[in-house]
Amino acid sequence: MEQKPIGFPGEGSAVERVGTLFYWAWFQAKEDAFLPPHPHRGFEIISYLLNGNITHQDTLGNERSLKTGSLQVMQTGSGVQHSEKYEKGTSGFQIWFEPFLGEANYATPTYSDYPAEDFPVETKDGCTIKSIVGGTSPVQLVADAKMWDVTISAGESFEMMVSDGYSIAGLVIKGQSNWQIHNETRLVEPQEFVVCEGDKIGLLRVGAGVHGGSRLILIQVPSVLPYPSYKEVKIRLKVNKEK
């Protein structure tokens, strides 16, 4: 079963993309499942496990097992195929980031994975902030992106600055929370997806309810893709091929 905060073009999701953030799926395996070998090219694809176990195989020769809290990164470059086995009860996110495909399509593909203990964790004012991508995290992508796993204790709040030209895409894993930016406040329910557009510098404040904490994933990306998109690159490659 999948919930897609950002689906592929034509899938009818509420948001087509946000800057370099191209695709975001929340998968939950009700039974043991197998995703057969399939190809990818160009995109940087991460899988972040909330719970359970995944066995990964790819044409680069990797056969790896991922457990709760771990992350895998495929920089798919000039092309790679992979397959995944999901144990019953496994849940997590698969997220695609778009680098400039005019270069990434010709790069050497790579695979890396990181156990839960590799990620730096900061505890501040009743909040636990785990850096997943960018910043102090060991995971650094070519695409401009940062990602955090944030847990907020009941009655506490988390704050971060949203820079001009950037947006925050957020998905609430559990617990109600109040989101406030630029004097606008919104109550966000579990499994709800939110995008805060940074057309100007602003303080994002997310507060958990007094009766229970909240856990959310936050991703910061440029509001606008800063180079030609995959569609434009595909068109240019096709035109050049026909010449």
Image (tube, rainbow, N blue to C red):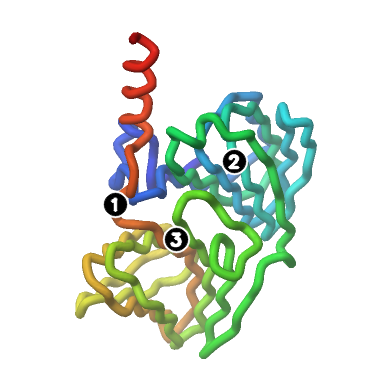
Residues packed near mark 3 inside 10 Å, few (<14), some (14 to 19) or many (20 plus): some
> Residue 175 at what x, y percent from top left?
46, 71
- Are the residues tagged 1 and 2 within 8 Å (C-beta)? no
- Residue 41: x and y in percent read 53, 30
Q: Residue 75, labelled with which disc? A: 2
Quarter residue 33 falls in: top right
Dot 1 or dot 2: first in sequence order is 2
Number of marks in the rendered image: 3
User: What separation in Å lies between label 1 and label 2 (alpha carbons)?
Assistant: 21 Å
Q: Specify whether 206 is left or right of 138.
A: left
**Amino acid type assigned to the residue bearing label 1 in the image:** Val
Q: Which residue is mark 3?
A: 219
At x 48% / y 35%, what residue is drawn?
Answer: 103
- Left or right side of 13 for 160: right
Q: Is there a contact, CB below 8 Å, between mark 1 and mark 3?
A: no
Of labels 1 and 3, the one closer to you: 1
Q: What element does badge 3 sit on?
A: strand
Which residue occupies the foreground of this view, 208 or 225? 225
